């Protein structure tokens, strides 16, 4: 997630008294272009380009009005389009904003942008500056902006749904609730430090703090223990196709991706390096890789490197597709779990390898070469023939079912938005400080000042997720609201 967010904030210089503009979207000569403006002189741009319409025709906030747009210096008619006016603070950035929706030709767009650039106090927007101004105006926090960035980059329906929930503040509410609980606990300790000698503060409040911290620790651990479900929905389920040489991995890869990504040949060892492709299965983003054929013994140094890379990729994958020949599977006469272990051991993946702990789908290829193929109601194994394009749909159905299980997807909608890697790092650090607080405050006669430091550090890590930090006034508000200090 960090790379996606970074483009919003790579440019740190931002002159707040400048009015900015940018081509928000454009669809070519036959379409519509939207030019957005934000800043204190937005109304000036409207007045100059529309030639200051009479009061009876003044723009109504948040209504689209058809207007002729003129060049303020040459008085040439530029275009005729829709103008929308969003006065502060009810706009995306929290500043005065407007949109010019005009014809999408290069001539029209460039003339309007040149006109805006020629107005004193106007300049083109920096990358992500509209979002940055929304953040500075407290219209969005970093979590919602990340969701907006994810929404812009969404390629599948599930990515869109998850990004939309995050952009809508669902995840922000989770962190806000934790922050409120942590702030209440910290306010209690600050009150003891500042007022305990002079005022009557109920000692039971310390017990409430301990219970609150215990609940926070449980909630945070449960939140983190999602097995990267959110990241898989966001970035794609990393999938590795494993199997012995010449078992049909490349053919299966090409069928799944519906294009010739991997080279297919009857010669063993055609695939040496990782061949990776991104696509979606039933709305799930998937990153799938064809790998070198695995076997225990080889004297070819290039094949050895290919096998090493295949195992390394599989160790980092979320899902393993184990491709085997039907004849090998039928000859084993084992249940599926025992066969997985035996076959992976045969290929050099030992019992202590983490690959064995992953979700593994068994696909039995070359079913056209055997007479008696088991019935298809065997849901643990899918039988396919890559040469005859049989069973591929069943394989896709099996993969889809596994993806739903891996990502904990609810078809009626996503119940929550799990953390991304940036959030996860801060939540882990916040949890560590809460653990330190519990260890320290568990002893008799502990120092309240030191305990408060642990709470404050935990709160600081949590606030780093949203980019909103506590100030002293907010702390005092909590203190005087929650406790009877003085009369």
Image (cartoon, grey):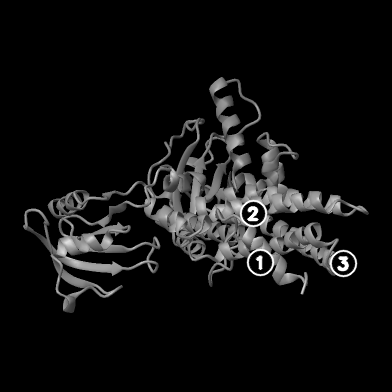
Nearest to the eye among marks 2 and 1: give it.
1
For the point 67% across and 40% down, the residue is: 344
Quadrant of residue 409 within the rendered picture: bottom right
Q: Residue furthest right?
A: 444
Q: Secondary structure at mark 1?
A: helix
Q: Which residue is mark 1?
A: 477
Do callouts 2 and 1 mark residues in contact (Cβ within 8 Å)? no
SS for dot 3: loop
Q: Residue at x 91, y 52 (%)?
A: 443
Q: Foreground: 351 or 63?
A: 63
How crowded pointer 2 is (Cα within 10 Å; few <14, some 14-19, many 20+) is rated as many
Marks 1 and 3, Cα distance to the nearest angstrom? 20 Å
Horizontal arrangement in the rendering, residue 334 relative to residue 423 (left or right): right
N-terminal of the two: label 3 or label 2? 3
Q: Position of residue 21 (x, y in %)?
A: 28, 53
Label at residue 462: 2
Q: Residue 444, located in which quarter of the rendered image?
A: bottom right
Between 146 and 275, the one lying in front of the other is 146
How busy is the neighbourhood of tag 3: few (under 14 within 10 Å), some, or many (20 plus)? Answer: few
Q: Which one is earlier in the sequence, the residue at label 2 or at label 1?
A: 2
Depth-wise, is mark 3 or mark 2 nearer the camera? Answer: 3
Q: CA distance from mark 2 to mark 1?
A: 20 Å
Residue at screen point 66% across, 66% down: 477
Q: Check disc 2 and report its element: helix, strand or loop.
A: helix
């Amino acid at each position: 997630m960090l790379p996606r967010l970074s483009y919003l904030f790579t440019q740190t210089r931002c002159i707040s008294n400048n009015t900015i503009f940018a081509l928000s979207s454009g669809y070519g000569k036959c379409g519509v272009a939207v030019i957005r403006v934000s800043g204190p002189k937005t109304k000036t741009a409207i007045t100059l380009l529309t030639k200051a319409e009479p009061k009876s025709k003044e723009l109504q906030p948040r209504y689209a009005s058809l207007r002729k747009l003129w060049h303020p210096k040459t008085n040439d008619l530029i275009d005729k389009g829709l103008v929308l006016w969003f006065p502060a603070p009810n706009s995306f950035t929290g500043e005065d904003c407007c949109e010019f929706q005009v014809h999408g030709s290069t001539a029209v767009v460039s003339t309007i942008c040149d006109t805006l650039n020629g107005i004193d106090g106007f300049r083109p927007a920096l990358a992500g500056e509209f979002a940055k101004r929304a953040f500075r105006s407290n219209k969005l926090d970093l979590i919602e902006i990340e969701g907006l960035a994810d929404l812009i980059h969404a390629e599948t329906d599930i990515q869109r749904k998850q990004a939309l929930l995050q952009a809508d503040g669902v995840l922000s509410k989770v962190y806000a609730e934790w922050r409120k609980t942590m702030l209440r606990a910290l306010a209690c300790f600050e009150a003891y430090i500042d007022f305990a000698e002079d005022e009557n503060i109920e000692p039971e409040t310390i017990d409430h703090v301990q219970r609150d911290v215990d609940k926070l620790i449980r909630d945070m651990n449960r939140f983190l223990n999602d097995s990267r479900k959110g990241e898989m929905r966001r970035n794609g389920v990393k999938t590795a196709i494993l199997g012995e040489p010449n078992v049909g991995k490349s053919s299966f890869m090409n069928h799944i991706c519906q294009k010739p990504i991997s080279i297919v040949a009857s010669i063993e060892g055609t695939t040496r390096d990782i061949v990776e492709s991104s696509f979606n299965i039933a709305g799930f983003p998937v990153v799938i890789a064809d790998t070198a054929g695995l076997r225990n013994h080889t004297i070819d140094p290039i094949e050895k490197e290919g096998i090493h890379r295949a195992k390394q990729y599989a160790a980092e994958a979320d899902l393993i597709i184990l491709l085997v020949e039907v004849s090998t599977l039928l000859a084993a006469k084992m249940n599926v779990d025992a066969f997985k272990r035996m076959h992976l051991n045969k290929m050099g993946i030992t019992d202590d390898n983490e690959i064995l702990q992953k979700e593994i789908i068994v696909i039995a290829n070359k079913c056209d070469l055997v007479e008696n193929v088991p019935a298809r109601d065997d849901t643990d194994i899918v039988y396919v023939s890559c040469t005859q394009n049989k069973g591929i749909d069943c394989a896709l159905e099996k993969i889809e079912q596994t993806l739903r299980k891996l990502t904990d997807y609810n078809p009626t909608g996503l119940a929550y938005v799990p953390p991304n890697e940036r959030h996860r790092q801060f939540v882990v650090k916040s949890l560590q400080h809460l653990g330190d607080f519990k260890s320290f405050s568990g002893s008799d006669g502990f120092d309240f000042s030191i305990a408060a430091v642990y709470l404050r550090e935990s709160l600081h890590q949590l606030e780093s997720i949203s980019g909103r930090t506590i100030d002293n006034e907010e702390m005092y508000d909590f203190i005087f609201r929650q406790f009877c200090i003085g009369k």
